Amino acid sequence: MCTITVNSPDEKETFRRNLPDDYQFVELVEPGRPDWFAAACRKDVRCDVLLVSGHFDDGTEFYSDRLGARESLPVADLERASCSESCPGLFSQLKEVYLFGCNTLEAAPLRTASAEIARSLIRSGHSPADAERLSRELGETHGESNRDRMRHIFKDVPVIYGFSSKAPLGHAAGPVLERYFQSSAGAEIGGGRASAKLVGLFAASSMTAIGGLRDSDADASVRRDACQLSDDRLSSAQKVAFIHRLMRGEMAAVRMLLDRVEHYVASLSDADRKTPAVSQALDELAHDRDARERYLDFARDADQPAVRARMIVLAGSLGWLSPSEKRAELVRLFGDRLAAGGVGVSDVDLACSLGSNHELDQERARLLPSAASISKAAHAAVLACLGSTDARTRVVRALASPYDDDVQIAQTYLHHRPIGDATELRDLAIAVLRMSGSESQVRALETLAAYRLADKEILEELTQVFSLAKSIDVQRAIAGILIRSDYRTIASPELIRVLRQHRLKSPDGADVIDALLRRMLVS
């Protein structure tokens, strides 16, 4: 029985205590060794049963929440080993896999077939009805839920146990496993058949059991395609050739595999690109004009601006867009968003992220913003992200707006482009303090907390606003600013008295106001 313990050992120890001596336990994790997984694959250990214990909340890796623990198990490493068949000891004779982590077998797809996929299928000649059907099938087969990924990784394994939502922590899972073994069901371990008893005991924690993918399954081709970019036995040139073949087909399939293609292309080093075989493969792809035009048409039609931006960046990496053409395409994206209206927080976040190196500033003139567009906080923020000083002034002022949507826009912008001028920051803080006590003011105050305010006059005014506040959330936001500031310079018996006397009753126990008072009393 092989164990990978990156968090709680409770499950492993419960199995060890209850299974007979002819079960040999092998822990594959070597604390302090970064390449422990690769080292484990090189060992001549044949695993009949695999037990993995670790948090798995975001679906990308098993990890630990213990202080000082550095070991983790990325899903990408498991996929690479499975696709490459480079870890035969771990995968080749597995009968059962136990995945003790949240959402390990969650069925919700990680990606969905968005509307542009159906539109692209219609452009390629399919009828609307066929396009809808094919789009739906693509979403079902390429959605890649956590459950699908585990089935693909542990191909042909008879039983995989995991959790479709929240899993119990180790200290809670251990006693449930004890009850399972006390029921004399332990003889089932390693038999390769799902235990209804075990699943039933963990039913309240969403345990489920499935089998690994088989070659006869309908989605077997999805694994084959995914493995084309994860199989270490394939050369870089072969992987680029696969991407080229993919680009020659339906762009809908490219969209569903976009994450994997992006990741692989980004992993190609300059040295990789300069090798003759890879250079030739990339050159052939770059000169495929038909694939280029269909790809860019699809990208420009994408419903999600972030997806369109990702596809534009990828086109640049594939040689389909020069640096200047890529900049023009990205600015065209924001021009389309501004013209369509409905610009929101995600657009501002995207514009500031893509414009962080100021490369897009020189293309901003293509947008030709009107005075009306700059008057809208969201439009102004997009233009400010692309270097407009007039728009920046407008969006910074929006932090003190009475409209919560505008405050959110300003908050997002200032996260990317923080204020560096002390006078400007002081003026903005005064404007925020003069807002009416509302959800918008709380959001604005929380934004100011990141600046660790040191202006004594502002800190004193914050205290005054605290004493007059009618909202516990406003008081907490002010306390959040004070506790991050140089509060020792303002700590005084009078301030402590004000905080104690005017604090509103907390409905849910101790909070940041209590923490601030404790620190000030110590100072």
Image: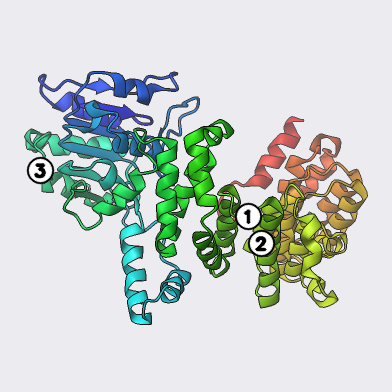
Q: Is residue 130 left or right of residue 90?
A: right
> Of marks 2 and 1, which one's residue comes earlier in the chain?
1
Q: Are marks 2 and 1 in contact (CB under 8 Å)?
A: yes
Q: Nearer the viewer, residue 459 or 47?
A: 47
Give the secondary structure at mark 1: loop
Closer to the camera in the image, 205 or 310: 310
**Residue 280: image location, x then y, percent:** 50, 41
Q: Name the kind of residue labelled 3 in the image.
A: Arg
Secondary structure beneath label 2: helix
Residue 437 position (above or below residue 149): below
Residue positioned 34% across, 54% down in the render: 145
Task: Say which quarter of the image contains residue 81.
Answer: top left
Residue type marked 2: Glu
Q: Which residue is mark 2?
A: 329
Q: CA distance from mark 1 to mark 3?
A: 53 Å
Q: Residues within 10 Å of mark 3 (few under 14, many from 20)?
A: some
